[in-house]
Image (cartoon, grey):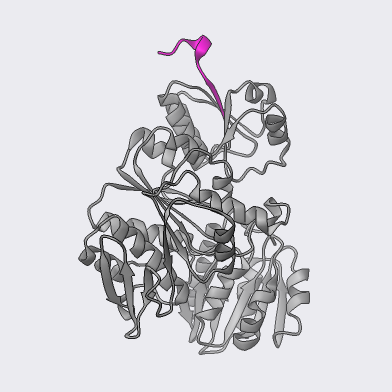
């Protein structure tokens, strides 16, 4: 047991998945740990902390105790502008993310995936390929159990980690072996002083500490990624992908509509038609996951099989049911404008679009041409719909203003005719009416089920 006088003190802000995991790892490593959450801690995490004998508080921050810490691990959801963070920063106490903390205690291979859109699908698809190929692999970051908890109690040889810009903000010495940036479009600008360059720099922190033995996978056509690559230097090997027939890229589509992937150890081809996931955005996700798998020298047959039998992600273009010939689609995970663009781009029928929620400084111009082309009605669902109603009032024949899920679904049901699609792809965060985008998506699916049972 470490002598208490020299025992390092760690304060953990936020007791969700990442905070609780960090607390357990810290306890295992002999830290004096204190967990503080200004909101409510879910019963599941209280039970985990109690079982480990870790001290915690909720509904408040004991400032003196937090400021006595040698280091602070902060939940990605807590902004630096909050009063407690202002106090921590003014005392110059080092602040790190749970991923940074966990990275100190493992030498596992790290495949790290970021991007404004598609990162959950790409992370789960990469994990699916590796797991199917028999690797000892863990899933972490914004999906799966926290990296810290796995490092503490269920270590793996490889981790596939989905990283948000918020997590990357507080990562310093952590290193990815394979880093993926799918795309960068405006998102979360409210956390970055409404400056796009700050958000871009946060995403590019994924390349920190990479060596010539490491690999950087990215979408070649992304204008923001391309521009940033001209401004920075990285020692990592570059692996660009494209949907065009460009052999200069390490993944591309050839004239026969086959997906080709070329890495130093593997050359793989596969008919695009065999990919489980449809749509251009999913082609990019499949290429990024396929490149990662090839760089890990996984057998080609295993890669092809996994890319062809992956079942997709909940709340991402997920069919929610068909009622009276109207298809309902749950894309609640579309919390920004670019996500909604991908959803609309894949629509082939007249669409009724549900938009709204907590606006993060959205510019709706990006989806305007698709809305004019494909959308017959917009139903705004949120506490503050003024911006949406004002922006789209001349773009669609019908626009409805609703303040609850029940009213929004009822309006869509009334407006839709057989052969239409109702698409929940809100462009906004969910926190005005729901606890999370998952909560929003599940409530939407339940409401559609109820419509169906009332009809039958």
Q: Considering only vertical position in the picture, is 447 above or below 5? A: below
Residue sitting at x 54%, y 49%:
205
In this orientation, does residue 426 appear? no
Is residue 124 shown left or right of residue 50?
Answer: left
Does the segment drawn in magenta span residue 4? yes
Residue sitting at x 65%, y 83%:
369
Near-viewer residue (215 or 370)? 215
Quarter of the rendering containing residue 391: bottom right
Q: Position of residue 203 (x, y in %)?
A: 56, 54
In this orientation, does residue 439 appear? yes
Near-viewer residue (161 or 177)? 177
The magenta segment is 1-11
Quarter of the rendering containing residue 411: bottom right
Near-viewer residue (386 or 308)? 308
Quarter of the rendering containing residue 425: bottom right
Does the segment drawn in magenta span residue 324? no
Near-viewer residue (134 or 383)? 134
Is residue 377 shown left or right of residue 52?
Answer: right
Q: Position of residue 400 (x, y in %)?
A: 71, 78
Residue sitting at x 56%, y 38%:
41
- Quadrant where the N terminus lies? top left
Q: Position of residue 216 (x, y in %)?
A: 43, 56
Q: Considering only vertical position in the picture, is 398 above or below 357? A: below
How many numbered circles are shown?
0
Q: Position of residue 102 (x, y in %)?
A: 44, 36
Q: Considering only vertical position in the picture, is 135 above or below 258? A: above
Residue sitting at x 52%, y 69%:
331
């Amino acid at each position: 047991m470490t002598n208490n006088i020299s025992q390092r003190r760690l304060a953990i802000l936020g007791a969700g998945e990442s905070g609780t995991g960090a607390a357990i790892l810290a306890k295992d490593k002999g830290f004096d740990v204190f967990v503080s959450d200004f909101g409510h801690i879910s019963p599941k995490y209280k039970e985990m902390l109690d079982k480990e004998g870790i001290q915690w508080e909720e509904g408040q921050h004991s400032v003196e105790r937090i400021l006595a810490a040698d280091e602070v691990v902060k939940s990605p959801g807590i902004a630096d502008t909050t009063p407690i963070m202002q106090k921590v920063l003014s005392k110059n106490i080092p602040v790190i993310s749970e991923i940074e903390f966990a990275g100190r205690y493992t030498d596992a291979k790290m495949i790290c995936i970021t991007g404004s859109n598609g990162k959950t699908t790409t992370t789960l698809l990469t994990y699916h390929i590796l797991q199917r190929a028999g690797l000892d692999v863990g899933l972490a970051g914004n999906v799966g159990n926290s990296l810290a908890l796995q490092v503490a109690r269920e270590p793996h040889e490889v981790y596939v980690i989905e990283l948000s810009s918020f997590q990357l903000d507080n990562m310093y010495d952590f290193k990815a072996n394979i880093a993926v940036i799918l795309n960068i479009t405006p998102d979360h600008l409210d956390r970055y002083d409404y400056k796009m360059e700050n958000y871009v720099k946060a995403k590019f922190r994924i390349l920190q500490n990479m060596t010539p033995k490491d690999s950087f996978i990215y979408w070649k056509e992304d204008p923001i990624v391309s521009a940033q690559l001209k401004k920075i230097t990285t020692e990592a090997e570059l692996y660009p992908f494209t949907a065009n027939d460009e052999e200069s890229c390490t993944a591309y589509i050839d004239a026969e509509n086959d997906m080709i992937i070329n890495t130093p150890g593997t050359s793989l081809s596969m008919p695009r038609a065999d990919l489980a996931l449809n749509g251009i955005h999913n082609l990019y996700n499949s290429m990024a996951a396929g490149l990662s798998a090839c760089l890990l020298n996984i057998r080609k047959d295993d890669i092809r099989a996994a890319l062809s039998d992956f079942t997709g992600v909940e709340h991402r273009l997920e069919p929610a049911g068909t009622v009276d010939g109207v298809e309902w689609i749950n894309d609640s995970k579309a919390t920004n404008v670019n996500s909604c663009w991908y959803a609309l781009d894949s629509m082939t029928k007249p669409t009724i679009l549900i938009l709204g929620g907590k606006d993060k400084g959205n510019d709706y111009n990006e989806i305007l041409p698709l809305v004019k082309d494909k959308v017959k009605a917009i139903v705004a669902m949120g506490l503050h719909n003024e911006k949406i109603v004002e922006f789209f009032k001349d773009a669609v024949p019908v626009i409805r203003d609703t303040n609850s899920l029940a009213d929004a679904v009822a309006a869509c049901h009334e407006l839709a005719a057989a052969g239409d699609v109702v698409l929940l792809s809100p462009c906004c965060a969910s926190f005005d009416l729901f606890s999370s985008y998952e909560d929003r998506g599940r409530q939407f699916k339940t409401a559609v089920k109820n419509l169906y049972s009332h009809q039958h």
